[in-house]
Image (cartoon, grey):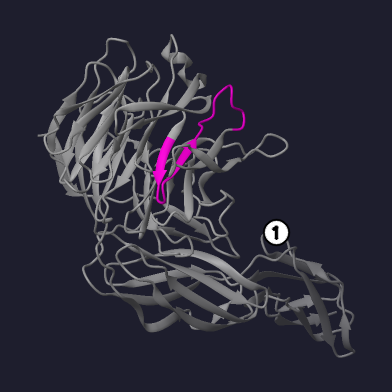
Amino acid sequence: MNTARRSRRLAATLLASALAGGGLTVAAVPAAHAAAGDVVAKLPISSFSALAVDSAHQRVYVADSNLGSYDNKGLVAVYDFSGERVTTISTQRHVSGLALDADATTLYVGGREGMLKYDTATHQPQGGLSLSADTCGRSLALAGGTVYYTSSYTNYVSECESSLTHLNSYHTDNTAQVTGWQDYGRLQLEAGPGDRLLMGQPPNTRAADPFVAVYDASGQTLVRTAGRRFADADGKGALNLKDMAFSPDGSRVAVADATAGTRLLDGADLSDAPTGYPALPSGASASAVAYSGDGKYLARGASAAGATPDLLLSPADPGDTTAPLEFAFEGSLDGDRVAPRGLEWSADGSRLFAVTTNTAGNQYWLHVVQPPAVQYDTRFTGGLTQSPAQAVAGEALAVRGRLELDGPAPAGPLKVTATRTDVNGTHEIGTATVKADGTFTVLDEPDLVGEATYTVSFLGDLTHRPATDVTRTVNVGKAASAIALTAPAEASMSTGVQLTGTFTAQGRALPERATLKVQRTDRLGTGTLSSVTVAADGTFTIDDLPRTRRDTTYTVSWPGDDLHEGATASATVHVTR
């Protein structure tokens, strides 16, 4: 039995957010884990063409197209919802698309020479219909009670990416019908609510500006109701289609675009939705997308290297900012990325089925992911504290607090986000990790004198609800400066006086070297001498020829600036003739 059960590690994403001001950083440890089961089965296939889920019988079907040769045999691997392989359906020629009828009694399988049918209870063949030969792999979708399928014939598989592909229909009376719709490339089909059908075109050499189209499949004739291409007048922004899906109510269409990420479109006219989904993590290229049947979740698959997440489970509502549940697949136990069109949900949303593949694309895995069934409350307790007690512009400030969680402890650290609001507006500070005891520390360098309000937020995850924000207002003062002055106890009018000193300023570095004012006070009165500019190492030297005998006091001062207090120092020298 090639099934592995284990507690999944979420994406080990090391996040470093540059803090506003002095370049400090907060490094968040690997991205928040959550309690979600993940069962993994190694698939007995060397290629992948389709995934279908039968919620009525709790079966998962994975098709191996095996297109390399005319004589290659295809198969459909059948699993239950716990990841156990039930059986394998073998065919005489390669298989590609899969579709289930409305009551899940029949599985339709796209074959090289025809449409194959299998009983979903016994997995025995139920006949089928001969069709025009297909050498590139069919895409199947059942809409309006009709199975729609693609057909493309070429002499060489290498020509399939840009071959002419026809869209036809297969009816329950074992008859096929030509729809007349056709275009170049491996056209992909996806069924939606309300007897609608999606057709999308991957990029190819004969389609510089690929399309997505919606069809009404309720009648005898397939009618296109919306269509869209995405390139601008300069040819930029063209669709790089990997997958697409209707939301359960049909109001939205999500598109996995390997170049643009997740596109969210209006289900009626395919215009951009007012609010889209957040961008995928840096370095992740979209490969799959699927809505849960209960309408709660959106699963987004990706191709990403290393610890960058390959799978994100987010609320289906794009306006919900709850942090996603993230999975990073790495190596021989998981695969390396989510395969294109490799995501499907159970009807009730209790399980997500994900097909992953290795970098070479010749090994595959089936993941059975169970998102948390409930969410628990969270809250900040005890308010926020700070250290040091007096905040200083340009110096590190630590803001501390505690997040309290109901329900089971998370499998890994959570994160809070923080902002600082001052007279110049609101600034993103970054993220901080919540420790096992709920405490966290946000580091910042405020860069303005005056009041600054820190707001800490927990956006929640699929296990925990967001917490009400907590704030603290801090009075930020100027940083200190100091002058240390060294002078001889005695000097003469003939040889002069030399004083040395050091100037230091805490907080943010000065934009230029400080210029110090120098005054001399003797029995004849007080006068201002030439100013002195501090050297790069903070030192300075003052040379003077006293004008009279007896005690002479030298006073060195700096007035300060917007971020620093001023400083002064004096030294008295006894002057002889």
Quarter of the picture holding the N terminus: top left
Residue found at the far left of this picture? 1
Instruction: Name the kind of residue labelled 1 in the image.
Output: Ala
| Residue 222 in view | yes
Q: Please determine whether, in this image, residue 489 is positioned above or below residue 523.
A: above
Q: Please determine whether, in this image, residue 34 is positioned above or below residue 55.
A: below
User: In the rendering, at what x and y percent does residue 440 appear?
Assistant: 37, 71
Membership of 196 in magenta stretch:
yes
Q: Quadrant of residue 435?
A: bottom left
Q: Residue at x 11, y 35 (%)?
A: 122
State which region is magenta: 189-209
User: In the rendering, at what x and y percent does residue 527 appear?
Assistant: 88, 83
Quarter of the picture holding the C terminus: bottom right
Q: Residue at x 87, y 80 (%)?
A: 528
For the residue pair 410 and 353, the one nearer the viewer reads as: 353
User: In the rendering, at what x and y percent does residue 457 appear?
Assistant: 44, 72
| Residue 303 in view | no
Label 1 neighbourhood size at 10 Å, few (<14), some (14-19), many (20+)? few
Q: Residue at x 36, y 57 (%)?
A: 297
For the residue pair 36 and 269, the one nearer the viewer reads as: 269
Q: Quadrant of residue 84?
A: top left
For the residue pair 250 and 365, the one nearer the viewer reads as: 250
Q: Quadrant of residue 349?
A: bottom left
User: In the rendering, at what x and y percent does residue 79 appear?
Assistant: 17, 38
In the rendered image, which residue does mark 1 sit on? Answer: 536
